[in-house]
Amino acid sequence: MWLQALVGAALALGALASLAAPRQSPPGAAIFADLSPAELRAVRDFLLSQPELGLVPEHTGPLAANRLFLVEMLAPKKRLALRFLNQDGPPPQRQARAIIYFAGQAQPNITEYVVGPLPRPSYYRPRHLKGRHPVAFTARPVTSLEYELLHQKLEEATAPLSRLLRDTTGYWYHNCSTRCLVYTDVAPRGLAPGERRSWVMLQRLVEGYFLHPVGVELLLDHRSLDPRRWAVQQVWFQGQYFPSVEALAQSYAAGSLRAERLPEPDTHELYSSYVPRGRFSTDTPTDVHGAKVCEPQGRRYRVQGNQVEYGGWALAFRLRSSSGLQLFDLRFDGARVAYELSVQEAVAFYGGNTPLAMQSKFLDMGWLMGTLAYELAPGVDCPESATFIDAVHLHDAAGPVRYRRALCIFELPTGVPLRRHFNSNFHGSFRFYGGLEGTALVLRTTATVYNYDYIWDMLLYPNGVLEAKVHATGYIHATFYTPEGLSYGSRVQRHVLGNMHTHLVHYKVDLDVAGTANNFETLELQLENISLPWSPGERLVQPRLQRRPRRTERQAAFPLRQPLPRYLLFSSSGRHNRWGHRRSYRIQPSSHAGPVLPRGWKEEKGIAWARYHLAVTRHHENEGRSSSIYTQHNPWDPLIDFEAFIRNDESIENEDLVAWVTVGFLHIPHSEDVPNTATPGNAVGFFLRPFNFFDEDPSVASRSPIIVRPLDPDTTRLQVQRWTPASPGPCVAPEPFHYNGTYREE
């Protein structure tokens, strides 16, 4: 019966609806699958039917009401999942995580619940949150209703500025139908716990409005659940501060305001637009299609529901609403390499001379990154031949919302051989040539966090290597240019400053290298000075291996301000390869991360994980995440204190280990970031590489190599050995480009 129930849940995987793959997940992958639309509705209906919760189904009306904010799959406890995966027990009970905003009571609060069992829930209970206190209600993510009320308040508040805005920008906010201004808000919303005060910036509502600030920023207090009590507390206008909107309007009316009139945007060549302008000097063609990815003999990977297989790789995946891409049960040739690999957090901390820029410290999990994976465009975001998969979320909505083509899977020619050798005979010919084409399977999704677009990739290589990578693109976060701003970025247009910022991304890698009993060590070189045994009196300097076992969590925490050891090895305690080495995997970061704030300084407490390139901890169920959706609006006193994960300095010898990896880069915007930041040079991540895990390179199992041997000295006759068809055949996209771009309630 339990297997039938599990397969039934897998069949309902509307959250992972591939265009070409079967919808049914194998039982091992199904326990990690996102909730289906039917399951999401079942949780919603069950909670709405509980009178003691007092939930209202509508997401309109007053703020002061109890509403369901988020429902997502609650991952099973690892010990229960492993029992099932190792065929030692039944499947874990399928459960949901539900977040309710209790705003319709004297003491508002945020409560998380565990709801189950699915697909027919019969219980709900408060979910234990690791932390020192309840979640402050002011730490909640902003809802669409609160944003609509903010818009209405800004319409009202900016009414006295209508003449100033029309005269200086040609656009306005109050009572606008054309030539409108729009606003951008930033976070955290205040300077201390309990506040909810947002700096907002006005911009011209044109295509790419992120690059069109008009020099007006307002501080709006919206802590009260009664919007009538909201108020603008300060105003910044083109470098000048005012205590109120009225004070700014009076200064302008009196003729004492320093105000620069902005030129009219050039609608024919709008600098923030993607419309082509100019010509390349070589005049090589760009009005025809470029190189394409194709699969001339069909797909070489398999997708079944939320399981993907490619070469030796097999894994389960999901698109978690709160934080994005998450992989489970990663195996190569049947051997588990990792139990979980997931995105935890992405931050961008800014500097500037305007109040909004100073306050811009974004922690993107607070904007629910997984729900920001909008439609991927075939031929641009992913090859036309990719498998596209929908996602379904129940977040800040009355029911499940489908996001079409939110994730794609495709095989990618890397453009460089996986391995090759030309064996010269040193007499103008060769003994043999051998090469294996370079390919990787890519799992890709995106997160458009307002102006920025993150492209999240997981790449699987046929030699047992996995690469986690993120590209940053989209629009820069720009503010109004004043000469003082040049200390904090670059002038990229006449009235636009691109503000400097640091991107940091945090990953969780729960490694199970040939089992859960693992050790961690670093491997470096040490130069030794020795006497030459074959030449008395002579000395030689050469490298020698220096192994350093890391026995406790503190020994395995590497501060961001110091260089990392070059080899970071996770090894099985009792499993060895054929040559006597402990089976190991290596983490190899590709990063330029640096500190963003002094240790312990205000908002830095919310990103304690960013103190370390790498931290290795013992696995605990209550240390499943390094950040939360509440940290963005309360970084000063966060629910999750990552430093507590390593404070007790537990032993990590022969234990179930988790690696927490920080990668990032500094971005000083420049004129070439207009209209968008480009992906080349703006990617960071890390590799998981086998290190004596196998007896030899496992890609020898691939039937894709080519070997060429001369049959006579002048190479007039050659033997070409291959295991694939001699010609790949035509490479043609089967259908024209199409795109929908909507995400709607089911």
Image (cartoon, rainbow, N blue to C red):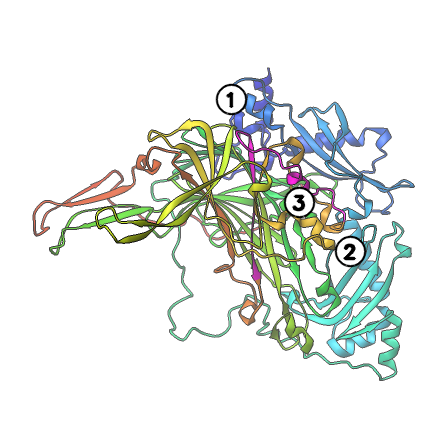
- Structural distance between the alpha carbons of marks 2 and 3: 29 Å
Is residue 652 shown above or below 257?
Answer: above
- Mark 1 residue element: loop
User: Is 510 within the magenta?
Assistant: no
Q: Earlier in the sequence, mark 2 or mark 1?
A: 1
Q: Nearer the viewer, residue 431 or 703?
A: 431
Q: Nearer the viewer, residue 27 or 304?
A: 27
Q: Earlier in the sequence, mark 2 or mark 3?
A: 2
> Percent x, y for residue 665?
55, 58
Q: Are marks 3 and 1 in contact (CB under 8 Å)?
A: no
699 to the left or right of 137? left
Amino acid type, residue under disc 3 in the picture: Arg
* Residue farthest to the bottom, as pictured: 255
Q: Which residues are magenta?
A: 637-666
The residue carrying mark 1 is 86
For the point 90% across and 40% down, which residue is it? 105
The residue carrying mark 3 is 744
For the point 59% across and 23% down, which residue is it? 6
Amino acid type, residue under disc 1 in the picture: Asn
For the point 37% across and 33% down, which residue is it? 694
